[in-house]
Amino acid sequence: MLFGPNGQGKTNFLEACYLLCTLRPLRAQKLAELVRIDAEEAHLRGALSVDAGEREIEVTVRDGGRSARLDGKAVRDPDELFGGIAVVAFTPDDLWLVKGSPDGRRRLLDRAVQNQMPVHLADSREYLRALKARNQLLREGARDDLRDAFDVPLSRFGARIRLRRERLLDALRGPAARAFAQITREDASLSLVYQASGRESDGLGAEAALRGEGELEARLLSALARRLPRDRDRGYTSVGPHADDLAVSLGEQPARTFASQGQARAAILAFKIAEIEGLRAAQGRAPLLLLDDVSSELDPERNAFLMTYLGAIGGQVVLTTTDPRLVSQAAAQAMFQRVWKGRIEHVSAP
Amino acid sequence: MRLCSVCCNLTAQDPCAVCRDSQRDDKIICVVESVPDLLAVERTREFRGRYHVLHGALSPLDGVGPDQLKLKELLERLSGGAVQEVIVATDPTVEGEATALYLARLVKPLGVRVTRIAQGVPMGGNLEYADHVTLARALAGRREV
């Protein structure tokens, strides 16, 4: 448990943990934000005990990109780090996911997929490259045969990304609804539905995902062709997993507009708990949990639920707080670290 | 060093050694992105046809379009009618794949067969040592036996 006043570096430590395990930033939008202003690069080194032994991971962030080494050997993707380490993080940003923009909900899904399937990150990166290339060609008014050449990989990676998200949701839906009921003790049931971009005429609705990757890919490809005039006008690709959303509802009502702030937060908490339990079942151990000052944002009852859950989880939990009393229930076996002016100091009690 | 006037390989003497070799098969051309890629294919000793080096792959974000690649030179070679097959050995990246698709569209109307090298798990290696990305993509690209 890391405690200390705001602005001392607590979140920085979680950011470092997340980057070491997943090779992507936690709260920062871009890797470049992780480098101190005026500095050329950020360098991180961490030792992780996983399964058999201890491994050393090093990450360097420079010029907006990152390079990583595992036991001194260069690695490109996190799946090369012992097949990936599952990390579930919970930050104050997450509390806004239900009410916020689709972008955050897509990230929520993709991070959960990556935990189960580390190769998802590499595929997402390829998808993004194809998407950016296509958008650039749309803006340049490039010839059709040139743009067509990028539509093919775009729809192939697009179909794969969407199906993985849908499979994840299928697995999480039930457990998340049960966790939500436990947290809120309300009648309204939580429902999570994948919402594909495009209109009905694009043929990308829920039914498309049931027809397999090949068919979905073909439908994405023809939706791209059908939307070409519009996409060309806007200089932007209007359909595909980058424009999809996760629809969260309570009963019949869309949570985005109808949920109370407390319900919206409980929905995300339920999603994370379902994710943790899914990982525990699949991997035989609890994921590494990172919680960034979440207790001060939850009402006492939901906080107590979370702390009891964490106390019993049997995995490693790193949490930060400005007020150690809020997390005492989870802290029976805790090591206390005081964070002050960028330094971390071990103390016997807060 | 300069570019070979036939295949765009780097060479001291024009045409390059591969193009001068009369033992090689003129009916088949392997298209690669770069000279190191040509050398890699050559090291296999599996391929006895000709080469063509594109010097890049289509990458709109880096300002690389068809005109920046040695495509015109390839089409000129194909117009002779002697070539029956073009093997596209571009990288298994979005850019490499787009280049292969673009090229196929240009070349097929000339009556030339266009093939693409297979992607997957390296032979001779154990499945358990293949990296996750390669293995996952090999699974996605599985074929009937």
Image (cartoon, coloured by chain):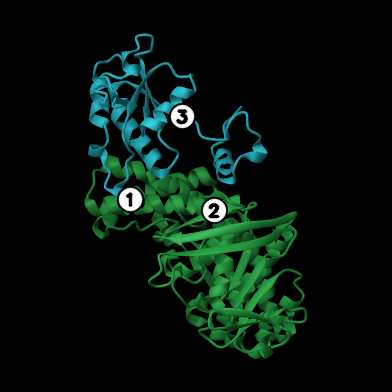
Chain colours: A green, B cyan
Asked if marks 3 and 2 fall on the same chain, the answer is no
Q: Residues within 10 Å of mark 3 (few under 14, many from 20)?
A: few
Asked if marks 3 and 1 fall on the same chain, the answer is no
Going 55% across and 41% down the picture, which residue do you hit? B134
Front residue of B3 and B33 = B3
Residue B128 visible in rendering: yes
Chain letter, disc 2 residue: A
Q: What percent of the width, then of the height, locates residue A186?
A: 66, 83
Chain letter, disc 3 residue: B
Q: What percent of the width, then of the height, locates residue A198?
A: 40, 59
**Helix, strand or loop for disc 3:** loop
Front residue of A233 and A324 = A324
Disc 1 designates what residue? A134
Asked if marks 1 and 2 fall on the same chain, the answer is yes
Disc 2 designates what residue? A120
Disc 3 designates what residue? B117
Going 56% across and 53% down the picture, which residue do you hit? A69
Residue A196 visible in rendering: no
Mark 3–mark 2 contact, CB under 8 Å? no
How far apart are the alpha carbons under marks 1 and 2?
A: 21 Å
Front residue of A101 and A209 = A101
Q: Quadrant of the C terminus of chain A?
A: bottom right
Mark 1–mark 2 contact, CB under 8 Å? no
Q: Amino acid at mark 3?
A: Ile
Q: Amino acid at mark 2?
A: His
Check the image and report above or below for A291 versus A220.
below
